[in-house]
Amino acid sequence: MTAAARARVAVALVVAVGIVAAVAAIRLAGSDGDGVVADPVPDDTLSAAGTALPDGFAVAEGSSLVGPVVVEEVDGRGEPTSWWALLLVEGDPIDVWMAYARQVAERFPGERIDPSQAPGCLAGDTGDGELCALGADTVDGTREARAHARLVSVPGDVTGSYLLTLSAATETRAVEGYDIYEGGGDPWSGEDLPAPVEPRDRPGVGDPLAPATAAYDGDDERYVLLVGSELIAQYGAGSVTGGFDLLLRVAPGADVGAVARAYAEQANQIEGEPIPPPEVVEHDGTTFTTYHPPGGAGGYTGEVIAVDQPGDADDYIRYELYND
């Protein structure tokens, strides 16, 4: 081998070593401190900015829709009258929050919301992971419209990211006209929001679903990940005294109805009490099946929604449990 060839090999080795070192550094920077890379929200669960949401809303720049929009009620034409969406915040959280506040303000001009002031953002962490909250409610004749947004980073979440929930509903009934502005806590001080909580490892089958927010001793043994599902994100801590709000994806080949029914049985607070027949809603080829397991004071109240999408699209489950 000539001297020139040896020199080229040496340069190539230095470059290769540098690349390996850089990759290792990147992996460690996104790890849990033990060299294990934190598992982010899976890319194949995300829909990009610009994706249309019901009622004229859209996924804002700096965020992505996680999973499907969950439709809870429809009108006589099959259009959503109550819906919910989970969003992953990838850009600056205050900028993203103001973008959604702007969409709420456009639809509720009577609320006089100033999106540039990051309305509803708190001066500090509330303890349950809620960082910003904004609600709007108005009535036109007998039509009441509502919207609500929350920016969170919940203790025990697996994403290591800010999450945002957006929901809206319309209802026709005999009501008197009024406007409500629902901010929360002290006005945003202009400082950075608390950093997202450190992610925990995603649970395997039989592992606790929400060990950081469940209300009672023994919950970690009862409320566990079931076969046929994976935990995508925890976006809430139930009530002020505990619980959880989770989005799960159903594994390929698993039956979303059977898995959702198993979670409803898991959430049942009254031994021997049957699960009531579910509510079923159809929209745009997707079937939403909602279970309300028996529960109440002295325990939990739960809701499990199975989202059965058409074709080869992934199915999902929204699982919420609130301590009473």
Image (cartoon, rainbow, N blue to C red):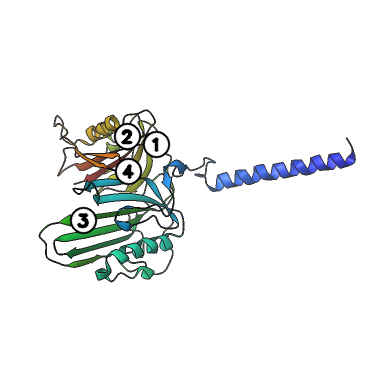
Report the residue that reaches farthest toward the right: 2
Q: Which residue is nearer to you in this view: 192 or 107?
A: 107
Could you tell me the amino acid type at mark 2? Val
- Which amino acid, mark 4? Leu
* Amino acid, disc 3: Thr
Residue found farthest to the front: 77
Q: Earlier in the sequence, mark 2 or mark 1?
A: 1
> What's under tag 1, amino acid-wise?
Pro
Residue located at (11% from left, 65% from top)? 176
Residue 140 spot, x, y in % from top left: 17, 65
Q: Earlier in the sequence, mark 1 or mark 3?
A: 3
Q: CA distance from mark 1 to mark 3?
A: 37 Å
| Residue occupied by mark 4 | 246
In front: mark 3 or mark 2?
3
Tally of numbered discs: 4
The secondary structure type at the circle numbered 3 is: strand
**Residue 217, quarter of picture:** top left
Residue 203 bears which disc, if any? Answer: 1
Q: Secondary structure at mark 2?
A: loop
Residue 170 tag number: 3
- In this rendering, is residue 49 above or below 118? above
Q: Position of residue 205 (x, y in %)?
A: 37, 31
Q: Which mark is nearer the camera, 1 or 4?
A: 4
Residue indicated by mark 2: 224
Q: Nearer the viewer, residue 79 or 133?
A: 79
Q: Which quarter of the figure has residue 278?
A: top left
- Residue 179 visible in the current orientation: yes
Residues at circles 2 and 1 in contact by the CB criterion of under 8 Å: yes
Q: Residues within 10 Å of mark 4 (few under 14, many from 20)?
A: many
